[in-house]
Amino acid sequence: MDERKNFAAPCGLYCGACSIMVAHSENNQKLKEKLTKVYGVAVDDIKCEGCLSDSPFFFCRVCSIKTCTREKKIEGCFQCNDFPCKLVNEFPFPAAVEVMRRSVPAWKELGTARWMEEEEKRYTCPHCGGRL
């Protein structure tokens, strides 16, 4: 699955659709400036190469869900019998919680490779092939 494996955040969010990831990979200064207001960080801190990479975004480095999956020695929430748990339900971005609740069961059903393919399709424009 190459370097995209770093895009499979343990919580079920797909990093390829993350605004931090997009701003960093496309060096989109306008988007970076907008995101500084959302996350309260400097423009230079708007960078990420995926949740599981050696260079995740600041908040992803300290994510309690990511820590939990590491402690349980599992790949992601899709392998956890406690999903959705308090960590998911109290995640600070309600839209992300909705995505996790949709995505994690799909990941469990499809397996990682197929789930990644489906998430990539979900966040790609079918007409132009651009990121959504």
Image (cartoon, helix red, strand yellow):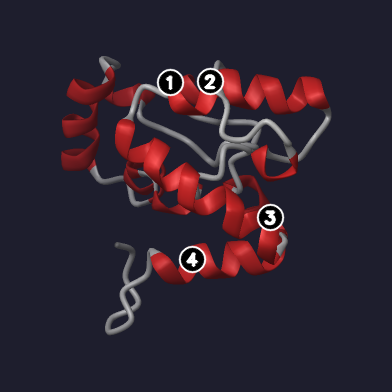
Give, as a three-letter code, the residue at label 3. Lys
- CB of mark 3 within 8 Å of CB of mark 4? no
Q: What element carries label 2?
A: helix
Q: Position of residue 128 (x, y in %)?
A: 28, 81
Q: How far apart are marks 1 and 2 (CA)?
A: 6 Å
Q: Distance between the residues labelled 3 and 4?
A: 17 Å
Give, as a three-letter code, the residue at label 4. Glu
Judge depth for marks 1 and 4 and give the one in front: 1
Q: What residue lies at 38% left-to-right and 64% top-to-bottom?
A: 123
Q: In this view, does 94 lie to the left or right of 58?
A: left
Please say whether residue 17 is visible from this viewpoint: yes
Q: How far apart are marks 4 and 2 (CA)?
A: 27 Å
- The quadrant in which the N terminus is found is bottom right
Residue picked out by circle 1: 90
Q: Is mark 3 on a helix, strand or loop?
A: helix
Residue picked out by circle 4: 120
Q: Which mark is residue 86?
A: 2
Q: What residue lies at 78% left-to-right and 20% top-to-bottom?
A: 71
First in sequence: mark 1 or mark 4? 1
Judge depth for marks 4 and 2 and give the one in front: 2
Residue picked out by circle 3: 108
Q: What residue lies at 45% left-to-right and 26% top-to-bottom?
A: 89
